[in-house]
Image (cartoon, coloured by chain):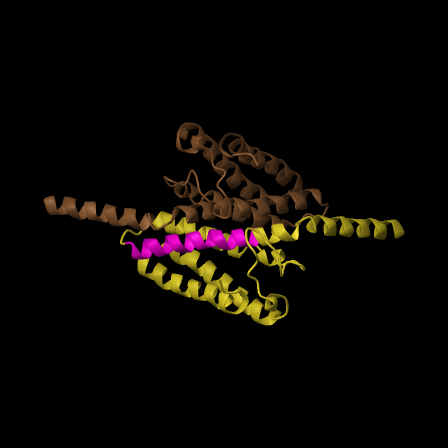
Chain colours: A brown, B yellow
Amino acid sequence: MKTKFLLSLIAVLIAGSASAQVKPEDAIKYRQSGYGFMAWNMGRIKTNVEGGNFNKEEVIKAATAIQAIANSGMGALYLPGTDKGKGWEETRAKPAIWTDKEKLGKIAMDFNKEANEMAKVAATGDAAAVGAQLGKLGASCKACHDDFRIKH
Amino acid sequence: MKTKFLLSLIAVLIAGSASAQVKPEDAIKYRQSGYGFMAWNMGRIKTNVEGGNFNKEEVIKAATAIQAIANSGMGALYLPGTDKGKGWEETRAKPAIWTDKEKLGKIAMDFNKEANEMAKVAATGDAAAVGAQLGKLGASCKACHDDFRIKH
């Protein structure tokens, strides 16, 4: 029994150290990368909706990338000690990320919901519906930026 | 007839200018973001395989993100004029990207194939198979780095 407990403890510690292999500056860089890549894909969808030349396949690719990144579990990149520091650039994360978990959780869930819906709408190829859903998805991004991201 | 032709021409010009809305420095930043986010997810899969604590759901999330980015059409970010310049950092793209299209195309197709296969293998939850596929996927990344990325 004691042995089993010790083995479990060792497993947890190993898992912990494996997870801790991500350095704080890398964690910041990875999350900035995720947001940066989503920004490109939001822009592509916008261009397709507004440019008068809607390309269904491109919109699906863009929506799929946003959805996969949104569902990837980026929360794990908000490690303790990453409230300050430089990844690609100085982090713009506000301290509230580590304190206002309830509000953050709601905003994150809403963002995931809208990203999943965006992928569904993209598959229909309906440009007007894609435009409407892009507005909802963009609003869910903005909600987080307003409360949890330092303005430039 | 003439009016229809002119309207088509205008549509093409608008679409062209919409596409040109991506500034060179943004295109470089977006592609660096894509590779940066894939690097995190490659690392997560590696940790799951080697850490003695395989989490199928996390591996699926990571593989799905890599797959979606691989299939997103990042080639569009290698715009003319982005062989030099700074996104998050100075681009490490070699000039051969814009000249050796045949070799680049083969490497890119191989990478897409391995990324799609990684997502399939991840879904099985077979840690050993995931480890083997990670090796193949990593090799397809390295093939591009060797020929088309400037070393640090």
Extent of the magenta region:
B30-51
> Which residue is located at x 42 percent, y 58 percent?
B118
> Which residue is located at x 51 percent, y 33 percent?
A144
Q: Nearer the viewer, residue B65 or A127?
A: B65
Q: Is residue B16 visible?
A: yes
Q: Nearer the viewer, residue B58 or A128?
A: B58
In which quadrant of the rendered image does the C terminus of chain A lie? Answer: top right
In the image, is B47 to the left or to the right of A92? left
> Which residue is located at x 49 percent, y 42 percent?
A90
* Residue A9 painted magenta: no
Q: Is residue B1 visible?
A: no
> Which residue is located at x 29 percent, y 46 percent?
A16
Q: Quadrant of residue B86?
A: bottom right
* Residue B32 painted magenta: yes
In the image, is B55 to the left or to the right of B33? left
Main SS of residues in magenta: helix
Q: Position of residue B1 (x, y in %)?
A: 88, 52
Q: Quadrant of residue A77?
A: top left
In the image, is B17 to the left or to the right of A6? right
* Vertical position of residue B66 compared to residue B105: above or below: above
Q: Position of residue B113 (x, y in %)?
A: 49, 63
Q: Nearer the viewer, residue A106 or B143?
A: B143
In which quadrant of the rendered image does the N terminus of chain A lie? Answer: top left
Q: Position of residue B75 (x, y in %)?
A: 60, 59
